[in-house]
Amino acid sequence: MQYLKNPSTDAHYNMAFDEYCLQQLSSDAPLFCLWQNAPAVIVGQNQNVYTEVNLPYLRQHGIQLARRVTGGGAVYHDLQNLNFTFVSPLHDLDTDVSCLLDHIVQALQQLGVPATFSGRNDILVEEHKVGGTAKRVWHDRLMVHGTLMYDVDIPTLTEVLSTPQSKLTAKGIASVRSRVGNLRQWLPQCPNVQSFYHLLHKQLAGTDAELVLDVHQLHAINQLAVEKFATWQWNYGLSPLGTFTKQQHFACGTIEVRLCVEKGILTDIRFGGDFLGNYSPTPLIAALTGTRFEHDALLAVLRQQPVNRFFDQLTNDQFLQFILS
């Protein structure tokens, strides 16, 4: 199968690369690309990042957040994860998707891995999930992409995808850890992810040649990354309405807060509890309403309305940790 090379490990660029290949490259036959991301959480196009992703953990550890153009759930990537993308002419959707995924499963089997495809979008080895897939149709073109966990950092994976509302938390962290698996244990011939890349690439490419993108195409991909996939509007602003209720005890007493966030904007906030303060929080509510629900934007508001005016001895940092955690 003809292939593309993408050496980037930037998640925003790589999301743009996938969309560009789907929408701008025309070919009579399928083509594929194997690629990697530096540590990043990739959410499905329709997901709410505030309920599915541990955003404070991402901020503290410098982990990227990116939104892809396909559906499905949030996934964690690091440099011990190998991703694949297929782009193909569309003839019959179910048949085409199945054929493309068969390429991955059969390639893994040729490497000695007893892989199967199961459920909606899981790649399994002996009941362990080692990868997931998603798809998107664009006119007469089809893209199927997915993940293959070679030796992914499972503790970090569980941290970044663990929130009170997330699917991971609902299933239980312990059960999720026991269900996922890394391919490294089934690949004794691959001492590192680079050797896995080369062997898998050889299985998929066969004797076919590389499709090389020219400088203008690469510039268009970079522009798409900057103008769409790296923007706050795309990664946060597409989040549907989410409502959160939090409660915590501080020196001022117990604070209860109800937050409504839609398309990344704090649309409503209400306080309750037995907390003490010098002023009613009404001015704070008015100032916060309509603000982007992210650290720096909220902090800018708090510099004008310090929270210790409304909650005795509470600092701005404590308040932000409370509502963003």
Image (cartoon, helix red, strand yellow):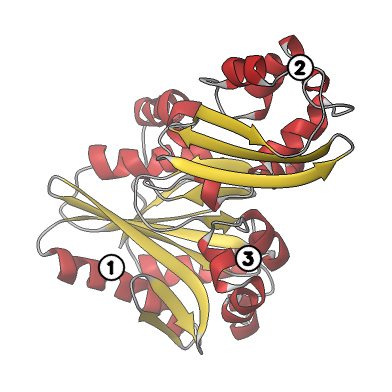
Mark 1 highlights which residue?
Answer: 100
Residue occupying the point 68% across, 21% down: 281
Which label was assigned to residue 36?
none
Q: Is residue 82 above or below residue 46?
A: below
Q: Residue 191: which quarter of the image?
A: bottom right
Viewer-proximal residue among 33 and 153: 153
For the residues labelled 2 and 3, the Cα–Cα distance comes to 58 Å
Circle 3: residue type: Val
Q: Nearer the viewer, residue 298 or 222?
A: 298
Mark nearer the viewer, 2 or 1: 2
Q: CA distance from mark 1 to mark 3?
A: 22 Å
Q: What residue is rendered at 31% in x and 43% in y?
A: 21
Residue identifier under label 2: 279
Q: Amino acid at mark 1?
A: Leu
The quadrant the C terminus occupies is top right
Estimate the spatial distance between the alpha carbons at disc 2 and disc 1, rounded to whole Å.
62 Å
Which of the 4 image quadrants contains residue 293?
A: top right
Label 3: which residue? 193
Q: Residues within 10 Å of mark 3 (few under 14, many from 20)?
A: some
Location of residue 142 in the rendering, given as x and y in whole percent from the top left corner: 22, 54
Image quadrant in which the N terminus is located:
bottom left
Q: Residue furthest top?
A: 304
Indicate left or right for 165 with 24 as reference: right
Q: Mark yes or no: residue 197 visible.
A: no
Residue 206 image point, x, y percent: 36, 69
Q: Is residue 138 above or below residue 71?
A: above
